[in-house]
Amino acid sequence: MTNHPFGLHRRQAAVGPERLLALGDAVFSIAMTLLALDITVPDGLPEADVAGAVADAVPTMGAYLLSFAVIGTLWLVQHGLFRLIAALDRWLLLLYFTLLALVAALPFPTRLISEYGETTTATACYAAAIALAVALMCGMYVRLFVNPDSAVPTISRTALKGDIRHGVLLVLVFATSIPVAFYSPTLAKYWWLLAMGTRLLYRKPAGPQE
């Protein structure tokens, strides 16, 4: 087996799933912390203006809570995913590092939607970021499905198909909200609520074969 630049072999990565997951946990925690840094009020306000400043910060707080929930959900999903990974290959590594890069950058679309939430550009950018994050996670499930050597032997391929379908549905929800945002940014945000309904279509996570 020939060596690959960056320490990767043709099929399998040099780093184990546990160490990569530890790196991912750090990136997720930093991204969640950075979200809170945008919640501020101006310094030196007179007492009469403090209530107004807090009211002005409400959209920022809402965007913070939304992105915190999104990143938290992705974090939970990644831990479920890594329980299914026996060995990393180049595709899994590429998909995961791309996901981490996107998660680390999520404070930017979060700030966009908090400051310009009524605009098409901010709403579409946020939806695109979430759609891409879910697509990358879904791509890792697909890689486990097409390359069983990377998956734990007890993985249920039937349940894995269901997780892939659920991921595709989530991608479709956020991707289709982008053209909706060109009609109405507010409607596009309500469109995101369809993501909660996708769990009703598929609930069981991938697990050991029965």
Image (cartoon, rainbow, N blue to C red):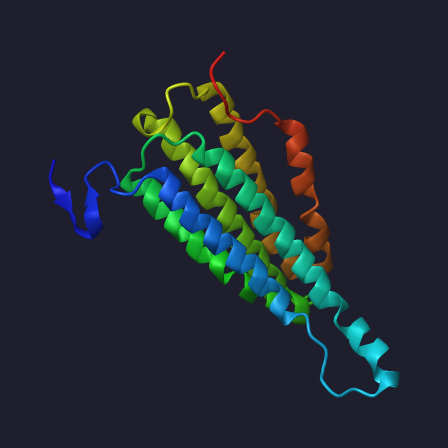
Outermost residue on the left side: it is 2
Figure quadrant of residue 63? bottom right
Residue depicted at 38% across the width and 51% down the height:
97
Q: How far from the left and from the top, in percent, is residue 19?
A: 37, 44
Q: Is residue 122 above or below residue 69?
A: below
Left or right: residue 192 versus residue 51 is: left
Left or right: residue 123 versus residue 100 is: right
Figure quadrant of residue 55? bottom right
Q: How far from the left and from the top, in percent, is residue 96?
A: 39, 46
Which is nearer the eye, 172 or 206?
206
Residue depicted at 32% across the width and 28% down the height:
147
Q: How far from the left and from the top, in percent, is residue 105?
A: 49, 62
Q: Is residue 130 above or below residue 206?
A: below
Q: How far from the left and from the top, in percent, is residue 42?
A: 72, 82
Q: Image quadrant for the N terminus?
A: top left
Residue depicted at 39% across the width and 52% down the height:
98
Q: Is residue 170 above or below residue 68?
A: above
